[in-house]
């Protein structure tokens, strides 16, 4: 079976990238192979993770392009030329346009640190998500893996996992628990489902074969 070539897009420390690397080493990504890491910044630890695992990495700094369209074209062209089959956003904080979606229709996955449709959309990223959850007083939060579409955090949901919120939680402790108990588990699981050809999309809903 041919490998499913995966590109992981990063802008920071790369903890979700590491979860995928570890899952691949354990044989948990089916035929998936992390073939490329693209970073929007040159000085992030995610690039060290790629280097230490012999994964090709490319830095595409947003500031070097004069528009979202120019950046998106460079991003799409790079991944197409590398023969990428699946794109995973792992803390990628740079906006791109329809050129990327059209090059990879229903082939871009993102993990969001909340149970969509709660605490999602514009402005909800990083600790902002967990601050909002604690301010609302929810008893459960969690993570969602969804297919990326032009509307922020509105694409078809692939997997979700709930995580208990504790009374003494801070945004930082809640973030850590959600990463450990949800994000780092369901992201590799969703990638595996994709690589096995078990994900289909109809009417903005994901259907998983065999379930």
Image (cartoon, rainbow, N blue to C red):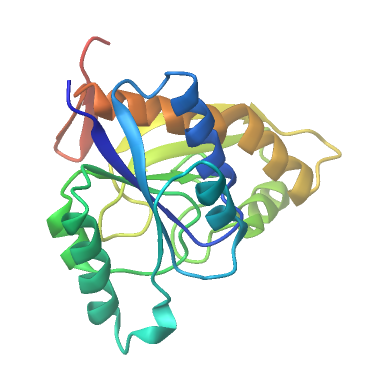
Residue lying at the far bottom of the rendered structure: 66
Q: Is residue 98 above or below residue 19?
A: below
Left or right relative to 181: residue 41: left
Q: Residue at x 32, y 90 (%)?
A: 66
Percent coordinates x, y for residue 209 in the rendering: 20, 16
Q: How many marks?
A: 0
Q: Where 152 falls versus 34 (above or below)?
A: below
Q: Position of residue 182 (x, y in %)?
A: 57, 30
The quarter of the image holding the N terminus is top left
> In this orientation, does residue 117 appear?
no
Q: Nearer the viewer, residue 14 or 108?
A: 14
Q: Nearer the viewer, residue 209 or 13?
A: 13
The residue nearer to you, when weighing 110 against 31, is 31
Q: Give the residue at x 72% y 34%.
A: 165
The quadrant in which the C terminus is found is: top left
**Which quadrant would residue 147 be assigned to in this image?**
top left
Side (left or right) of 122 relative to 99: right
Instruction: Point out the residue furthest to the top here.
Output: 210
Question: Residue placed at 24% from the left, 80% from the top?
Answer: 70
In the picture, measured across the screen, residue 108 lies left or right of residue 105, that is right
Residue 57 percent coordinates (x, y): 42, 57
Q: Position of residue 188 (x, y in %)?
A: 44, 29
Outermost residue on the right side: it is: 168
Q: Nearer the viewer, residue 82 or 87?
A: 82
Q: Is residue 19 above or below residue 155?
A: above
């Amino acid at each position: 079976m041919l490998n499913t070539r995966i590109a992981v897009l990063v802008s920071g420390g790369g903890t979700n990238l590491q979860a995928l690397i570890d899952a691949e080493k354990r044989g948990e990504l089916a035929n998936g192979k992390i073939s490329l890491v693209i970073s929007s910044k040159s000085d992030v630890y995610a690039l060290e993770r790629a280097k230490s695992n012999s994964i090709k990495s490319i830095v595409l700094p947003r500031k070097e392009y004069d528009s979202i369209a120019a950046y998106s074209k460079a991003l799409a062209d790079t991944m197409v030329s590398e023969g990428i089959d699946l794109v995973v956003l792992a803390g990628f904080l740079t906006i791109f346009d329809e050129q990327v979606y059209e090059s990879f229709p229903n082939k871009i996955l993102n993990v969001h640190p909340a149970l969509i449709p709660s605490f999602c959309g514009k402005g909800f990223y990083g600790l902002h998500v967990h601050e909002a959850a604690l301010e609302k007083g929810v008893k459960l939060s969690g993570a969602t893996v969804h297919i990326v579409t032009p509307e922020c955090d509105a694409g078809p949901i692939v997997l979700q996992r709930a995580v208990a919120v504790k009374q003494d939680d801070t945004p930082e402790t809640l973030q850590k628990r959600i990463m450990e108990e949800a994000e780092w588990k369901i992201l590799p699981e969703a990638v595996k489902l994709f690589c096995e050809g078990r994900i289909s999309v109809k009417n903005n809903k994901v259907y998983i074969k065999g379930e």
